[in-house]
Image (spheres, rainbow, N blue to C red):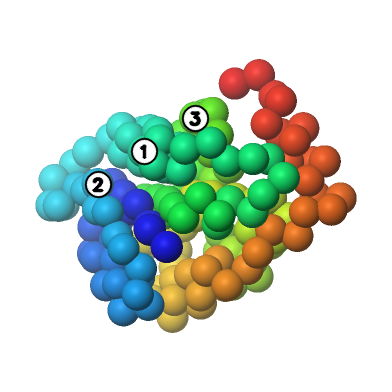
């Protein structure tokens, strides 16, 4: 699996931790930055990552689990809120703001989410590790959830 990752200035250290974790799990990681703690605007990184995830994934059928695309995104900011709001503005992205392993698994299982968002100031390393493990192993359930994902995809952005 390929993970594309980005943050803002608040999450640089957490991004680096997350990147190392993903690589230890055997994943390829594309790091979109930033690479210092100099102030940046999170919408710029969220938009760049979201467009890149959709571009790398290519055409993904609504009926299929997003994991079949071979690519996911991870966005980190102070709380994860700004990143998730921005990412969800990009057509083809379903970004889930997660706080623990349960919300991470549900974002995948029920929403076929393709971008995981979390807060650098609200999530410790153990929580991040459990969220990524849950995200990584959870498949989209389809069924009744597919109808809802289709409705989300039809909303005017």
Nearer the observer, 74 or 120: 74
- Across and down, in percent, residue 151 comes to 77, 32
**Dot 2: element:** loop
The reply to whether the C-beta atoms of the residues labelled 3 and 2 are less than 8 Å apart is no
Q: Which quarter shows the C terminus?
A: top right
Q: Is residue 150 left or right of residue 57?
A: right
**Badge 1: few (under 14), some or many (20 or more) residues near its Cα, within 10 Å?**
some
Residue 9, placed above or below residue 15:
above
Q: CA distance from mark 1 to mark 2?
A: 10 Å
Give me the residue at 46% from left, 55% from top: 70
Give me the residue at 70% from left, 24% from top: 155
**Residue 127 visible in this rendered orientation of the protein:** no
Residue 150, placed above or below residue 154:
below
**Residue located beneath label 1 in the image:** 52
The reply to whether the C-beta atoms of the residues labelled 1 and 2 are less than 8 Å apart is yes
**Residue located beneath label 3 in the image:** 90
**Residue located beneath label 2 in the image:** 32
Give me the residue at 44% from left, 80% from top: 126
The earlier-in-sequence mark between 3 and 1 is: 1
Closer to the eye: label 1 or 2: 1
């Amino acid at each position: 699996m390929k993970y594309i990752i980005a943050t803002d200035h608040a999450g640089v250290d957490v991004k680096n931790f997350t990147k190392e974790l993903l690589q230890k799990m055997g994943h390829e990681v594309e790091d979109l930055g930033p690479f210092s703690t100099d102030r940046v605007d999170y919408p710029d990184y969220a938009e760049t990552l979201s467009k890149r995830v959709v571009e790398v994934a290519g055409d993904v059928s609504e009926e299929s689990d997003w994991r079949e695309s071979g690519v996911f995104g991870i966005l980190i900011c102070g709380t994860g809120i700004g990143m998730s709001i921005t990412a969800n503005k990009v057509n083809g992205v379903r970004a889930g703001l997660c706080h623990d392993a349960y919300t991470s698994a549900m974002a995948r299982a029920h929403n076929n989410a393709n971008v995981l968002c979390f807060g650098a100031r609200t999530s410790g390393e153990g929580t991040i590790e459990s969220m990524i493990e849950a995200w990584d192993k959870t498949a989209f359930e389809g069924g009744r959830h597919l109808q809802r994902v289709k409705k989300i995809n039809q909303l005017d952005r």
